[in-house]
Each structure stands twice: as structure tokens, then as C-alpha cells.
Amino acid sequence: MFSPGTRRDFLRIVSASAVSLSALPEWGRAWWFAETTLPRSKDLPKIDGALIFNDEARERMATDIGGNFHRLPVAVLRPRSVEDVPKVVHFANKNGVRIAMRGQGHSQYGQTLVQDGIVIDSSTLNAVRLKDERTVDAQAGASWGEVTHLTLAQGLTPPAMGDTMTLSVGGILSAGGVSNSSHLFGGVVDNVEELDVVTGAGDLLRCSAQRNKGLFELALAGMGQCGLIVGARLRLAPAPRWVVRRDLEYDDLTTFLSDHRTLAIQAPVEHLGGYVLPREGGPGWRFRINIGKFCASPEKIDFGAVESGLHFKSHSEPIAQSFSDYLQREVARNAAPWLR
Amino acid sequence: MFIPGSAAEEFVARILATPSEVEGMTRFSLYTLSTYKFTRPMFMLPKADLALNIWLFRRVPIADKSRYPEAVAAVRSLAERVLAASGKIYPPYAPYFTQPDW
């Protein structure tokens, strides 16, 4: 299997054969080096949404959740249709203006910011539609909570979603997405059937593992550098009704990591987490594995077989919660993660 | 950040023994991943069967701006150690994101 050393290595190899990315060098120049400001003239594209120039809207897009940088865009696009995005990309290319697409701005070091450029606020592209029992279509700005609100009503769920339901589909797919179930299901990007992507040339293309494969592979976890994800067809699986979790406690790092590896390899649980915590009442550290089983009925869960062969010091009583409550477990913390 | 499984214990132990890397820690969580489950080429993981995914969140009080460069330097140092251990950084939370880094 081809295994590139860096993302640039992969980009060089794929872009040599992918017609849809023929304008990528132009996109790269526009992204990184353009210094021009946006003309407020009759040249502005006719779009369904709005290009907004007021200070309040621009300021809202000038920082991300990391709070380390302030980069003020010259305008904010609030698209009302997917077609608005390629129109503005064309416009930006023509005028040498940089673009960043932003979901919830959950980057730490300014990755979703662009000084003097255009920020595409994807939150207005948030439609979600169940296609069939296997897949759901979601626009980039839809949150994972909006996706599951629709799918859980049908007893279905994406198998991998990241751990924070308030984040956007486009944001997670651009980043990659890992979760407490990644030991079973891989990254969120491994559970996508199809994408709608706007290329650097301003073309809106549908891509998948069978069609425009190069673009599909460059866009998933591509951080928006190889095309802007505007929509996705996500795989679905039957949703569990309940999740039962418990903590396994450890005093030493070696045993903790050994048991964590065993659980990841043997995969007897659907939820697998781990934490380093300050030791209570003194210096040093303690360690915790959080395991969880997905099930139809919480009464039937027995962790005996799961825990056989593990070497924890103690464990908590199991706690059962509905799957929909389980999906919300990280929302409060990630609302301001550095403060919690 | 993602550390090859074989280097995970030494890497975590060093963080825990380095006060500047855990000061202000608000969350330190770990997942072990089987890398073969990750099939998309742009999602970079270590070239190893297992990888430890480490999320280390720290906070510097906003009022104490003099501490900020020191905290950033500690994060950068940690990121360089990740790469030196043949690990990978998760791009949205990377402490740098320049064209050469990409």
C-alpha cells in the first residue's frame, strides 16, 4: 500500500494524475501569498446568500476556540446554497484573495482564520436528509447533533462522529475525526461514502472512492487545503439504545497502557477512553480507563468477560445512559475546553 | 498527537515528569488506536500497528500574559518531540501551521 511520508508527498503524487485538481497550484498561491483586499464593487458575484462586510460579523470570524490569534477577514460569506461557494472561490481567485472555510472554529492555532481574506461561514449550509437506511446526506455546516437528531429517530447512527456533537460535519471531515470508538471504526473520515467538494479552481465536484478518487482522498482530513467540503454522504449503522460505562483505576502507567492496548486490540467494548489524573492528596499521577458497551438493554451487560485478564486496581459501578445522552457527553466541556 | 505504540510509555512518562509540560493541565486523555482501521491517506498516523492518541489541554491565565510565550514554547517543544519519536500531530490542534509544516 502506498504510504506517503507527508501530506505534501501525497499531494504531489495524486495531483499529477487528478484532472480535477489541475488548478491546485493556483489555489496554493491564492491561499498563502495573496495580499490584496476585497473590492466592494459591481464585480461581486451574484449569490443566494450574502457577503458581509460589517465589523461585527468579521470580528466573530477573527478568532478561533484556541484564542491565540486575531486575524480579521475582509468579508464573511454566509452561503444559502452550495453553489454560492464555487462562485466566491472563482471571485477570490480572480482577485487574489485568500479563503478559509469555517465550521465552529474549533481550531487552536488559527487554522480557520484568514487575515484580509474571506471566511466562508458554513453554519448556514446545514441541511440534513436521510437518503436510505444506509446513508444520510449532510451539508458541511450541519452539526453532528443535527445529523443524529434525524438518524436516531430512525434507529440509525453514523458509527464514527468525533466526541463533540456541536462540531460541524465539514469541520470534522476536514480534520479527520477521532473518537472513543476509533479503535473499532477508525477515523470519522473512514465512514464517508461520498463528498461534494469545491476545488481551488472553483469547480463543484462529487467524489467518492469510485469517482474522482484523488479529490476524495485529498479532501478527507485535508484541512481544506485541497478543496472545500460542502456536503457529505455518511454511512449509517443501527443505533444502540443504551450505553453502559464504567471506570477501571490504575496506580501505574505501565499497567494502564498495557491494559489499554489489550482493549484496543481485542475490542470487546465499543467505547474506550483513558485519562491521566492528579493523584488525590499528594504528588504523582493516577490513571483511568473508561470502557463502555453499546446494547439494547442495560440490564444484560456483564463486564466480567471484558475485564478478565486486565490488571486494574479497582473499578466503579457501571452507569447506564441512553445513546442520545451518551452522544452529548463532551458537549459542555468542549464549549470552552481550556477552562474545564 | 499520535505516538507509535512502542514509544508511548516513555513519551507519556516524560511529559508527566516535566513540570512545564503539565502546568495548567485541564485534561490529559489517551486512546490506543489500531492504525489499520484508518484508511484515508491524508489522516497521518505513525507507521506502527498501534498508536497512542494523546490529548493534552493546558490553560494559561489570560491575566498573566508574560507566561504565554513560555507555555507556547513548551507546546512547541512537545510537538517537536512527537515528530522526533516518529509521531504525528493532529492538524486542527497543531501548535503551528505554516506552509513548510504542511
Image (cartoon, coloured by chain):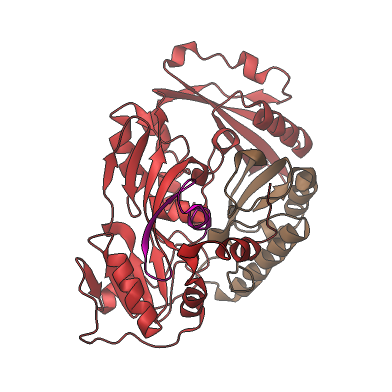
Question: Can residue A3 be seen at all in this image of the molecule?
Answer: yes
- Please state the horizontal and vertical placement of residue A246, each as a whole percent of the image: 55, 26
Kindly identify the residue that appears in the image at 33 percent across and 26 percent down: A155
* Chain represented in red: A
Say which residue appears at 64% left-offset and 35% top-offset. Answer: A288
Q: Is residue B18 above or below residue A188?
A: below
Q: What is chain B's hue in the picture? A: brown
Residue A66, visible in the rendered structure: no
Return the x and y of residue B21 as percentages of the image width and height. 69, 59
In reply to whether residue A205 is colored magenta, the answer given is yes
Q: Quadrant of residue A275?
A: top right
- In this rendering, is residue B42 above or below A45? above
> Residue A216: image x %, image y %?
48, 53
Q: Residue A227's image quarter?
A: bottom left
Q: Find out whether residue A111 is within the magenta segment.
A: no
Q: Is residue B68 left or right of residue A84?
A: right
Q: Quadrant of residue A306?
A: top right
Q: Residue at x 59, y 56 (%)?
A: B90
Q: Compared with residue A159, is residue A168 higher up or lower down, i.e. above or below?
A: below
- In the rendered picture of this protein, how many numbered marks are placed on residues? 0
**Left or right: residue A106 compared with residue A81:** right
Q: Give the camera-side residue of A307 and B52.
A: B52
The part of the chain drawn in magenta is A200-222
Q: Position of residue A87 (x, y in %)?
A: 29, 71
Q: Nearer the viewer, residue A311 or A314?
A: A311
